[in-house]
Amino acid sequence: MDIDLKLLRCAVALAHHRNFGRAATVLRISQPALSRRIATLEHQLGIRIFERAPGAVVATSAGSEFLAMAEELVSRAAALSNRLDLMRAGRAGHLRAAIGIIIADIAVNPAVIKLMSTNPGIQLELLETDGTRALNLLMMDRVDLAILDISSSRDMPGLRVETLGALKGQYVCRAGHPLLALESITPADFRSYPMAFPRVSHEHGAWIQDLDGGATTDAASGSIIPSIAVTSCRLMYEIVAASDTISAAHPSQVAKDVESGRLVLFDLPWQKVVPIAHFGMIHRHDRTLPPSGRLLLDMVRTVFSAL
């Protein structure tokens, strides 16, 4: 039997108010229209749901049992409708995102905090990793989108790329590092110390490959692996602050440590390829981007534009 949800709402409202006039007002229909709907429902069910008592409308014994189930259905339908409204607005649902380590530290983490504080209905799964693995997760349908350095992904078939912009980095070391005592830093001086950094694509190999004596190339992916490969910016800068290891950073990432005198940013005048990364969001052409993904990207874009 197919029962119109509209008729169930009428029955639940009448059971609650016990008066045709009050129930009709709440439902925003006329009293005769409500009477017709209740009669239609009773005819479909083959039972009498209500009977008139002095000064009120009361449920029959069979009607009481039916109304308990009807109220649950109406309540669940309302909850479903509200949930769908939130999902359409990007304020609910399950979102899986792979995030590049650097952009996570710079812009995604602050955006996620804002997103979840205003949209607690979103179930968010964040996988922070290097760019190569983030793309693999996307292609294997393990995530809905990836936010990362898009330099090696612009022309990949089947992917849609939306840019955020470019950021220039600088090299960073601890205060008191031996390099800082030199009048000028040569490539040989720089290569005397290990580098801590995430894996980078071969397009960015010059950032570390010619500077890090311990760097190697991953034969499978072609990515460059520094002496100390990390998957956490927080860990990376702690290693730099506590040793002679060198890394790279956008100034916003280490601003407090630079201000406190813990870390020092510096450039290499002789370097031909400066560390500039082009960031963006990538998702698959053959998959629908969840509305919450669009909401996250908008918040990341807001944080990014303020850098």
Image (cartoon, rainbow, N blue to C red):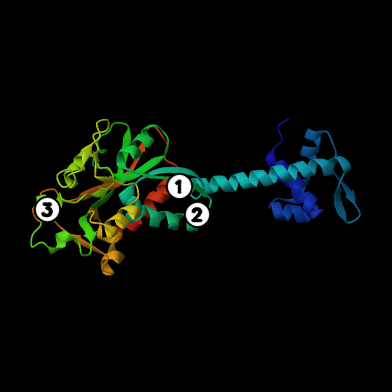
Label whose residue precedes the other's in the sequence (2 or 1): 2
Q: Answer left or right for 83 relative to 30.
A: left
Label whose residue precedes the other's in the sequence (3 or 2): 2
Which residue lies under the disc numbered 2? 119
The answer to whether residue 307 of the structure is visible from this angle is no
User: Which residue is painted at 30% across and 41% down in the image?
Assistant: 131
Which residue lies under the disc numbered 3? 189
User: Which residue is painted at 75% across and 50% down in the image?
Assistant: 13
The answer to whether residue 283 of the structure is visible from this angle is yes
Residue most toward the bottom? 260
Q: Are marks 2 and 1 in contact (CB under 8 Å)?
A: yes
Disc 3 versus disc 2: nearer the observer:
3
Query: Residue 303, position in %: x, y?
Result: 34, 58
User: Which residue is painted at 42% across and 38% down in the image?
Assistant: 143
Query: Residue 278, position in %: x, y?
Result: 24, 47
Quick one: 280 or 61, which is closer to the camera? 280
Quick one: 264 or 83, which is closer to the camera? 264
The amino acid type found where label 2 is placed reads: Asn
The amino acid type found where label 1 is placed reads: Ser
Which residue lies under the disc numbered 1? 292
Report the Cα–Cα distance between label 3 and label 2.
50 Å
Q: Count residues near mark 1 (Cα–Cα under 10 Å), then give few for <14, some for 14-19, many for 20+.
A: many
Q: Which mark is residue 154?
A: none
